[in-house]
Amino acid sequence: MAPRHGRGVTLVESLVVIALAAVLALYAIPSLRATMASNRADTLANQLVASLALARSEAVKLGQSVTVAALGTGSPAGGPYDWGSAGWCVYSGATCAAGTSAMVQAGAPVAPPMSLFGNMSSVVFDATGRVTNLASGQLEVDFIVCADGSAAAPNYPQAQGVTVTSSGRSRVAGHASGQPQLNTGTAMASCAGP
């Protein structure tokens, strides 16, 4: 009578499987983190676009100006303006004050390392839905969202842009070579500002 062999797994086979799983995890985890960061940037960009669209529709509906303003601060040179650390506010009237009828919506602050910067501190929509506070010759308002807080150009692993044209149309910016693009087709400068 021949001896019966067990159908178990040997220690060597188990170690080989564990080693293969570890190698696969080394490749999968950074990719998963990048995908999650990219999704966070997309979500924040879409939230900003929704707030801008709400402000535009409220301006038309109310027949008066409605403003979307950064609650953060900008550099003394006039930008880039921080729209992320303190969030933003959609309001009609003179100021954004919580609990007043003038406040339409508030955007929550963004947790680091995410960042959100714009080239203006506010966007004002008039009763026709057009942006009224653009400087002479300025065609759009631009924002850049970065999930990883990186300011290194041209490496935009998790960046997303938002543009608002003078007509008031807001949209998530297109991409080329992994970089968010302005409406003119040129790349946004860095994650520290459009």
Image: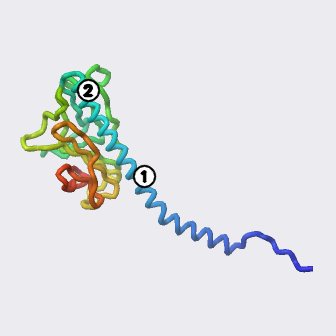
**Mark 2: which amino acid?**
Glu
- Residue at 25%, 40% (x, y): give it: 170
Q: Position of residue 44 (x, y in %)?
A: 34, 43
Measured from the top left, where is residue 17 in percent x and y?
62, 69
Q: Nearer the viewer, mark 1 or mark 2?
A: 2
**Hey, which quadrant is residue 75 in on the image?**
top left
Tell me if 33 is positioned left or right of 94 in this view: right
Q: Residue at x 26, y 29 (%)?
A: 57
Q: CA distance from mark 1 to mark 2?
A: 33 Å
The residue where tag 2 is placed is 58
* Element marked by disc 1: helix
User: Quick check: 132 above or below 156?
Assistant: above
Q: What's the residue at 27%, 32% (across, down)? A: 89
The total number of labels drawn is 2
Give the position of the N terminus as an image quadrant.
bottom right
Residue, disc 1: 36
Q: Nearer the viewer, residue 8 or 58?
A: 58
Q: Helix, strand or loop at disc 2?
A: helix
- Given residues 129 and 11, the one toward you in this image is 129
Q: Earlier in the sequence, mark 1 or mark 2?
A: 1
